[in-house]
Amino acid sequence: MKKIIMLVVITCITISCDCYQIVSGTVIDKETKEPLNDVVVYNKNKPYNKKQTDSLGKFELSGISGGMFGCPPMKVIIERAGYTPGEVEISSGEEETIELEKKTAN
């Protein structure tokens, strides 16, 4: 009986180490402050789940993350042709406005 109780306790602790995250934001041009559509955004730790911003520059990402004492911020990569890629950390449940800067011709 003690082994069964111990197994249940360990299982509960292990399961509780994961959290479901939802982060969102708006990507805008740094100079014009206009929203940017078709910007690729994804969780740095899960690059296979890429999304694109809509016509208003908005996006939403979700996923399961490990975190013994709460959800760690999600590291979000932002990429669009002609712009310098960006990386930001967004806390679960938060919404960020992210400015992308156009690449300069050398």
Image (cartoon, rainbow, N blue to C red):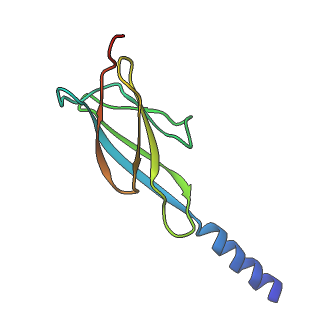
Which residue lies at the image location 55% right of the left edge and 36% below the top edge?
47
Relative to 16, say whether 2 is above or below. Answer: below
Which residue lies at the image location 45% right of the left edge and 55% below the top edge?
73
Which residue lies at the image location 52% right of the left edge and 70% below the top edge?
69
Left or right side of 23 for 5: right
Quarter of the image that includes the C terminus: top left
Farthest residue, direction top: 106
List x then y, in percent, for residue 58. Answer: 29, 37
Q: Tell me which corner region of the image, top left, top right, bottom left or bottom right, holds residue 65.
A: bottom right
Could you say which is closer to the camera, residue 104 or residue 7? 104
Left or right side of 63 for 83: left
Q: Tell me which corner region of the image, top left, top right, bottom left or bottom right, holds residue 76.
A: top left
Q: How many marks?
A: 0
Quarter of the image that includes the N terminus: bottom right
List x then y, in percent, for residue 60. Answer: 37, 43
Farthest residue, direction front: 106
Q: Tell me which corner region of the image, top left, top right, bottom left or bottom right, holds residue 66.
A: bottom right
Could you say which is closer to the camera, residue 2 or residue 96? 96
List x then y, in percent, for residue 33. Answer: 18, 31
Relative to 103, say whether 67 is above or below. Answer: below
Q: Is residue 63 at all visible to an observer of this figure?
A: yes
Q: Is residue 1 at all visible to an observer of this figure?
A: no
